[in-house]
Image (spheres, rainbow, N blue to C red):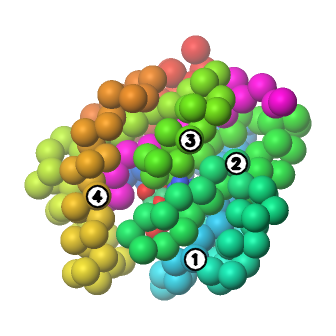
Amino acid sequence: MKNFKKLIIITGPSGVGKGTVVKEILDNNSDIWLSISATTRKPRKGEKDGENYYFLTDESFKDMIDNKEFLEWAQFAGNYYGTPLATVNEKIEKGFIVLLEIEIEGAKQIKDKFPEALSIFLLPPSKEELEKRIRKRGTEKEEAINKRLNRANYEIASSNKFDFVLTNHDVDETVNRVLKIIKS
Ligand code: 5GP
């Protein structure tokens, strides 16, 4: 069994700013590696297979579940998302700190299986601000926005299950706080 002390989970509702915070961290820390997830969601404009996600069919995703190739997987807003296990193991063995940017059900699965992994939940300053951020991103249709907002209420209610809860008021401030937690 691997030791996942170097596994860091960043979770929180869609639109909270996980992606922006993670990008900022990666740009300035070559010892930290971000896992590329698999998903059955269709690529957004500009997203590339193998860079943003591995974009899979339902069938291929289910094959990977059957073959136990995921560290965790979950359904989110009508699509499947999962973390491929092999590369995470490989990067940890090479000494990298591995970041996962995932939704809350997957984060809980990892916490249950590997309590030594560190989990950070990002909260929005308010639900109104979260809605504003999702709409401003402009990547989802109305139905998908509503699914994400409904789910956010449930996700926020579970924030106390994680090791650290940070309110993402400002990206730079959140990045500094996350880095302090990771490096301590
Ligand atoms: P999006 O469709 O906006 O890219 O992602 C939707 C949600 O799925 C986000 O909260 C994102 O963090 C989460 N997500 C991305 N990859 C994974 C994964 O591998 N596993 C799980 N459980 N969630 C993921």
Residue stretch rendered in magenta on the structure:
1-16
Residue pointed to by mark 3: 109
Which quarter of the picture shows residue 143?
Answer: bottom left
Q: What crowding class fits label 2: few (fewer than 14 Cα within 10 Å), some (14-19), or many (20 or more)?
A: some
| Mark 3 element type | helix
Q: Residue 121, percent across and down?
A: 39, 36
For marks 2 and 1, give the CA distance.
17 Å
N-terminal of the two: label 1 or label 4? Answer: 1
Residue labelled with disc 2: 71
Q: Locate residue 26, reporting x and y percent.
A: 61, 46
Q: Is residue 6 left or right of residue 135?
A: right
Q: Nearer the viewer, residue 93 or 46?
A: 93
Q: State the residue position of label 4.
A: 151
Residue at the image position 62 percent from the left and 80 percent from the top: 58
Q: Is residue 11 magenta?
A: yes
Does the closest atom of ligand 1 sit within 8 Å of the Cβ of label 3? yes
